[in-house]
Image (cartoon, rainbow, N blue to C red):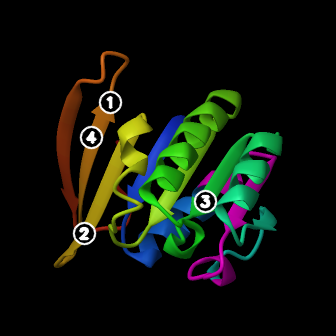
Amino acid sequence: MELVREGFNVLISPSKIAVNEAIRVSDIYLSCLFIAGNRISILTRIKHGYEVARAFTCHQLLTLLENAHHQSIFIEHDPSLFESLRDAEVVALALRDTASRCETLVYYTRTSDEFSSIIPRHADRIIAVTKHLPGYVADIIELNPKREVKSFLLSDVQMTLEV
């Protein structure tokens, strides 16, 4: 399933989709960084292709983003990193800045919470995937330079959607 593109992507999806996208991204780029927090849900299912870093606080996440020099960065959302909504806003701005220095940045969350709902405000693309038998439905919102929203609904029985 090719959902993630160049730029700053927010991926809200079941873990199976996130694992597939993470593997696909690592197959494309030579230099990939996976940033995990206190909780790890998909990293153990990604067998290769990533340098791994852990952030246990919001400050550590900001430092990792500031020092990142990879072509692709995949970040798994961890709400325990944030102490306030202001922390999430600062991280969102740092993600935007980091995305301008790499080819693809993916911020992944399985569900939306008060902190992860702030991050998409600064993204280039928001991808929300839900299970819909017999496959998945992807709602893709592209935020162009004018910050206009365009929404596309994709549906397919197979796990190979191309946008």
Q: Residue 50 in the image: x percent, y percent?
A: 77, 62
In the displayed structure, 111 sits above or below 145; it is below
Amino acid identity at mark 4: Ile
On the rendered structure, is 92 left or right of 128? right
> Which badge, 3 or 2, comes first in the chain's sequence?
3
Give the number of the mark in front: 4 or 3.
3
The quadrant holding residue 70 is top right
Q: Secondary structure at mark 3?
A: strand
Residue that badge 4 annotates: 141
Asked whether residue 41 is drawn in magenta, I would say: yes
Structural crowding at the residue carrying mark 3, measured as other residues with C-alpha within 10 Å and reported as few (<14), some (14–19) or many (≥20): many
Residue that badge 1 annotates: 143
* Residue 75, numbered label: 3
For the record, the magenta segment spans 25-44
Q: Residue 13 in the image: x percent, y percent?
A: 36, 67
Asked whether residue 105 is drawn in magenta, I would say: no
> Which badge, 1 or 3, comes first in the chain's sequence?
3
> Which badge, 2 or 1, comes first in the chain's sequence?
2
Structural crowding at the residue carrying mark 1, measured as other residues with C-alpha within 10 Å and reported as few (<14), some (14–19) or many (≥20): some
Instruction: Determine whether label 1 and label 4 are within 8 Å by CB.
Output: yes
Q: Nearer the viewer, residue 121 or 155?
A: 121
Name the residue located 71 percent from the left edge and 62 percent from the top edge: 34
Residue that badge 2 annotates: 130
